[in-house]
Amino acid sequence: MTTALHRATHWHRPLMVFVLAMAVLTVVAAVGIVADPRVLTGAPIWLKPFKFAVSFVVYGTTLAWMLSLLPRRSRVAEWAGTVIVAMSLAEMVVIVGQVLRGTTSHYNETTPLNAALWQVMGASIMVLFAAHFVIGIVVLRQPIADRAAGYAVALGLGLSLLGMLAAIPMVLPGQAPAIGGIAGAHSVGVPDAGPGLPLVGWSTTGGDLRIGHFVGLHALQALPILAILLSRFGGTRLDERRRVRLLVVAGGAYGVLTMVLTWQALRGQPLLRPDALTLAAWAALVVATATAAGVVVARRRRPDVALAA
């Protein structure tokens, strides 16, 4: 454990420093949730910084680990990682600063200052998306020695971009509520501050675009974890080729799941109250994924052909 932590300190330095800062902010925000009685949009005012800080701890650590897997040092990828740190830091400064001011950060255009801060956040996210994309390209150009791990990293990076794109409907003109100075919303069919699931706050009365966004982003962790599990518990039955094919199946299913969840939200449906059409889409995804995985596992290996001397 100590050796692993020591290695981690030598990963991408700016990312790991940022992770440490976000870990500290996580503790500060957790104290704020308990100690600060203020409520904003139906939730403790420090809940948003807490959730974003935890998310950035996971995201930054995963990205730094992925960069450490590259067979050759890439200055382009390292610079892209540093750009991600700068953009993420800018976003967190706005979020925490708005909490200290007692107002919202997202979609807030109620004053010129709030509008400018919201535009800074939007620009930061766009640059972060581009830097994340650059890292994905570098990973594709530098194949990792372990093919299964390489596919997991590449798929995770690509699908997390899909998760970022799933947030676009939140800021489209049609999504803005009929409230002056509010430029978007994450809930569909109901106000943002309505009843929600514990901790995450996803709407229980209408659609919530944060669900597909959340699921897509965490492909960055889900696919590498699956690769590790397949390698550790697959035994002799799952050779490298089978593991790669299973990861491709899982990646395809994960991408479709992200789109189905976003589609469900856009139709104003709570996550736990899908209609028959949504249930049919989920069932089709489960059946297709299970069938494809079964075919990969059941397919026999080609016997080695001995050449006659």
Image: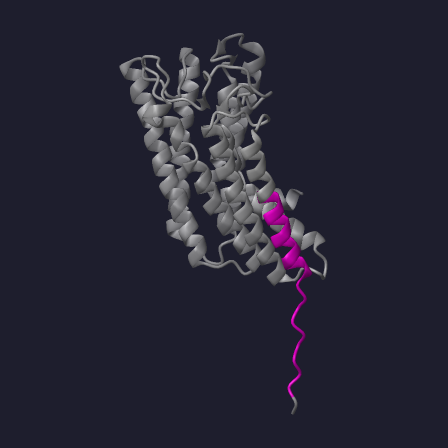
Region rendered in magenta = 285-307
Would you say residue 296 sits in the magenta stretch? yes
Q: Please name the predominant secondary structure of the magenta segment in the image.
A: helix
Location of the N terminus by quadrant is top right
Q: Is residue 294 above or below residue 124?
A: below
Q: Is residue 151 visible?
A: yes
Q: Position of residue 85 (x, y in %)?
A: 42, 36
Q: From this viewpoint, which residue is outermost toward the top?
A: 37
Q: Position of residue 239 (x, y in %)?
A: 65, 62
Residue drawn at x 66%, y 52% is 230
Q: Position of residue 75 (x, y in %)?
A: 38, 51
Q: From this viewpoint, which residue is outermost toward the left?
A: 112
Would you say residue 30 sits in the magenta stretch? no
Location of the C terminus by quadrant is bottom right
Residue drawn at x 56%, y 24% is 200
Q: Position of residue 167 (x, y in %)?
A: 42, 32
Q: Is residue 220 visible?
A: no
Using the rendered view, name the quadrant where residue 277 is placed.
Answer: top right
Q: From this viewpoint, which residue is outermost toward the bottom?
A: 309
Q: Is residue 299 above or below residue 279?
A: below
